Amino acid sequence: SEKGTGEIMIMGCYGIGVSRTLQAVIEQSHDDNGIIWPVSVAPFTVSIVLMDPKDPAVSGTVDALEAELVAAGIDVIVDDRDERPGIKFKDNDLIGFPVRVVAGAKSLAKGGVEIKRRTDRDAVIVSPAEAVAFIKNLIK
């Protein structure tokens, strides 16, 4: 103190940690279906939903696309769980990956894979050869 006597100090500390920062992101970026991660902090930028894992054409397309995305420096996760499509889609929305790619026999029959940003309503069919460039354009 000014009088030269000792006093007990009470000090508080409020730090901005990783968990608080992520909580703030979630608070600002979500909807009724779950989190909407910005690309800069997303756990994975792209989620590939594998619809027909026993179909060699589909699994081959997914393997190639995953490898191309990784080579391009894009974080990707493949949802190859043995679940119904609705559960996979709901989980992907809940987790909030910025981009969802759906690969299945139906999409390949239409000419490619379905690509959709988490914030978009509708998916777009893109040929597997153009998918990485399309995704790069979505996330920039």
Image (tube, rainbow, N blue to C red):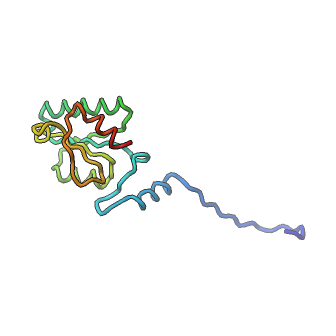
Q: Nearer the viewer, residue 99 or 5?
A: 99
- Give the residue furthest to the bottom: 3
| Location of residue 133 (image quadrant) | top left
Tell me which residue sits at (34%, 38%) in the image: 136
Instruction: Classify 140 as above or below 24.
Output: above
Estimate the x, y position of residue 88 in percent, counting from the top left.
22, 50
Estimate the x, y position of residue 14 in percent, counting from the top left.
60, 60
Instruction: Classify 110 as above or below 63.
Output: below
Tell me which residue sits at (15%, 34%) in the image: 58
Instruction: Classify 34 as above or below 48.
Output: below
Number of numbered discs on residues: 0
| On-image quarter of the N terminus | bottom right
Image check: 67 left or right of 38?
Answer: left
| On-image quarter of the C terminus | top left
| Location of residue 79 (image quadrant) | top left
Tell me which residue sits at (54%, 53%) in the image: 17
Image check: 135 left or right of 85?
Answer: right
Estimate the x, y position of residue 40 in percent, counting from the top left.
43, 46
Instruction: Classify 43 as above or below 3.
Output: above
